[in-house]
Amino acid sequence: MSKHARARSRRPRTSRASRRVVLAATLGLVASGACWVYLAQGPDKAAAAATTRSDARPQAAGRAARDAQRDLLQGLSGISEETRKRIPAESRQLILVTGKARDSSESTAALYTRPAAGADWVRAESWPARNGARGWSTDRAYGDLTSPQGVFALTDAGGLLAAPAGTRLPYDKDASFVASGRGVNGESLAGSFDYVVAIDFNREPGNSPLDPAKPEGEEKGGNIWLHVDHDGPSQGCVGIPKDAMKKVLETLDPAAKPFIVMGPEGF
């Protein structure tokens, strides 16, 4: 046997028990280290989760507020709850005209329907619209170039042209539906009164839109109509595209108690 062999033979052997102790100690250190890593990451993850929850809260609150507002307005938008309450519960057809601002002549008109009295409204179509050159007024005076703000019935129609097929509102076809002069901005008014629906502001329902009667006095003005847009602001009427006027006449039904709600955004 060589010297090196003898030297190896004298090396003390580690017992199985000792190896188990060392292995247990090593595993304990690893476990301890893993636990430390987990704990070190824990607060960051918790902070991130807390931030996510914090960001989600205002978003959820905003959604809840919008949902609540939509419920109050029964599917409408751009008006106040006070205005919505003025719409008769029995009405099932509605034209909503919302102006860009109180002093603006630019607006949007939307046609809404609902399946039953008191149900939520569903928007069917919308179109660009024009209103009075000086915007809107709750106390309109003749010649002030504003459109009346409020909630009004739609009961009578007429125009220079024959009624579109399916028209159910009383319709007066008359050669007198011709606008004279020019628009506020000097534009041609030709064709503006091809189709009109009278807005029941200072007028007697059940008569032709041409009826001159003004039951609340001449000083308020009258003959406020929904008519064909002439590419310019009006003296008080609401103008929408010709195809839109045809759609309105084909849709409105006296049995559905149609109304128009009109004014600046949020009124």
Image (spheres, rainbow, N blue to C red):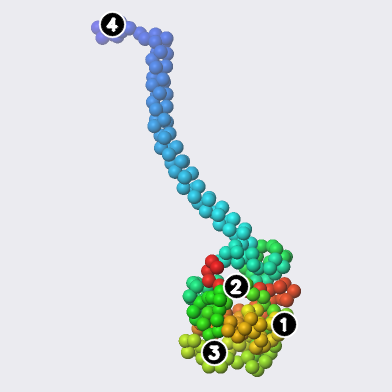
Find numbered disc 2 in the image and state the secondary structure of the residue it sits on. strand
Label 3 sits on what residue type?
Leu
Q: Which residue is mark 1?
A: 206
Q: Residue at x 64, y 62 (%)?
A: 74
The local crowd at label 4, few if under 14, some if 14 to 19, many if 20 or more residues have their Cα within 10 Å, is few
Q: Is the C-beta separation of discs 4 and 2 under 8 Å?
A: no
Disc number for residue 6: 4
Q: Quadrant of residue 13?
A: top left
**Marks 4 and 3, how far apart at CA:** 123 Å
- Mark 1 or 4: the one toward you: 1
Q: Is residue 13 above or below residue 94?
A: above
Mark before the other along the chain sequence, 1 or 4: 4
Q: Which residue is mark 2?
A: 150
Q: Which residue is mark 3?
A: 189
Residue 163 visible in this rendered orientation of the protein? no
- Mark 4 or 3: the one toward you: 3
Q: Position of residue 93 (x, y in %)?
A: 68, 71
Mark before the other along the chain sequence, 1 or 2: 2
Disc number for residue 14: none
In the image, taking residue 6 as reference, residue 208 lies left or right, namely: right
Find numbered disc 3 in the image and state the secondary structure of the residue it sits on. loop
State which quarter of the image contains the C terminus. Answer: bottom right
Q: Position of residue 222 (x, y in %)?
A: 61, 84
Mark before the other along the chain sequence, 4 or 3: 4
Q: Position of residue 53 (x, y in %)?
A: 48, 44
The local crowd at label 2, few if under 14, some if 14 to 19, many if 20 or more residues have their Cα within 10 Å, is some
Label 1 sits on what residue type?
Gly
Label 4 sits on what residue type?
Arg
Q: Residue at x 58, y 58 (%)?
A: 69
Find numbered disc 4 in the image and state the secondary structure of the residue it sits on. helix
Q: Position of residue 138 (x, y in %)?
A: 56, 74
In the image, taking residue 16 as reference, residue 135 lies left or right, namely: right
